[in-house]
Amino acid sequence: METTVDREGLEAGLAALEAHIRDPVAGVFGPGSATWDINREAVVFLAAGRAALLQTAHPWVAAAITRQSQTLTNPLGRFHGTFIRVFRMVFGSRDQAFAEARALFRVHARIRGPLPQDAGEGEGGTYTANHRPAMAWVLATLVESALLIVEQVRGDLTAGEKQSYYTETQRFAALFGLAAGDLPPTWPAFEAYCAEMTAPGALAVTDEARTIGAFLLERPLERLALPGKALPRWYKALTVSLLPPAIRREFGLVLTEDDADLAQRVLGRARRLRPIMPGLVRYVPAYHEARDRMAGRTRGRVLTRQMNKLWVGRPDLVSPHAERARLTGRA
């Protein structure tokens, strides 16, 4: 198998995926899927920092972010762009999900360059954003982090629930151009893969990665018209506490007793608040917009659009109205 995703491979994966989609309006997953059940949870964002640091621990990802991404110059824009794309893949119609898959491929196809000297062995000393192992790792961090935080807040998940979610992840992987062989076949094998990747010495945390990590944990709000404002201490403490110990050490992060205690208090509060939160807050607005689409509405409800605007800077993401806007260039 080629180590880089190409257009032919992506299109072949999308064609195979389309053959199994029963309702194009429901999309790749749809109501009742394990993917909707997990990814609708707003608490998944509590693990976003963890996933981001795990991703940048891969030298190819860190190099691409440093030289080709808005992360250090416009973190809010990068945050919005990433989650708009992910939400459309997960909660969008078939056409919306496939359009995002193709757009992501085009973006990644343009990203390549030299690896830093502390990145270890690379293919020809260069990185490409469509590199299969790097993309598989990025996807893995999203999957593992989502299940980790949902289990800690919502309650233990059964082995069957985890396997169902992971089985559907293979569909999500196809939207990245990844094939079945790019990820472990079962949830236990996936757990072993993640443990191996986060073991001491498995990933080369470069100076570029440490720079990104320090920025994300200390100074992202400087770019949000809030100079001098650091990331809330509770979120930093939670992020550091959720990292595997070896990765934490590679980034030069220390989990103090006070921060560990603060992280546990945050999780405890999330456990108490989640059951009494209204659905509009408990679940991400893209999920509510998708439910409106399934009910035949051409646009999300007013509160849903307002919440979308708050979360990702755009009121319409996965409705027929949003699709028309994308096709006419007004999105």
Image (cartoon, rainbow, N blue to C red):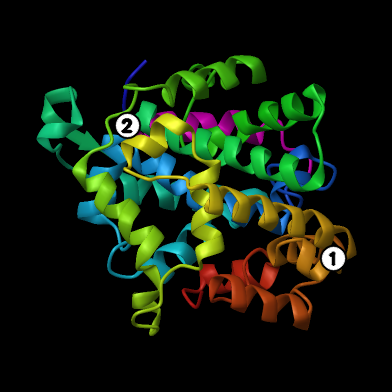
Residue stretch rendered in magenta on the structure: 6-23
Residue under the point 77% across and 38% down: 34
Residue under the point 69% across and 56% down: 265
Relative side of 304 to 245, left or right: right
Which structural element holds mark 2?
Answer: loop
| Residue type marked 2 | His
The answer, for residue 223, to whether it is visible in the render is yes
Tag 2 residue: 131
The circle on residue 16 is: none
The front one of 82 and 30 is: 82
Residue 16 included in the magenta stretch of the image: yes
The front one of 24 and 236 is: 236
The circle on residue 279 is: 1
For label 2, the crowd category at 10 Å Cα-Cα, with few meaning under 14, some 14 to 19 and many 20 or more, is many
Residue 180 is situated, as x and y percent measured from the top left of the image, at 54, 20
The front one of 235 and 125 is: 235
Residue 259 is situated, as x and y percent measured from the top left of the image, at 53, 53
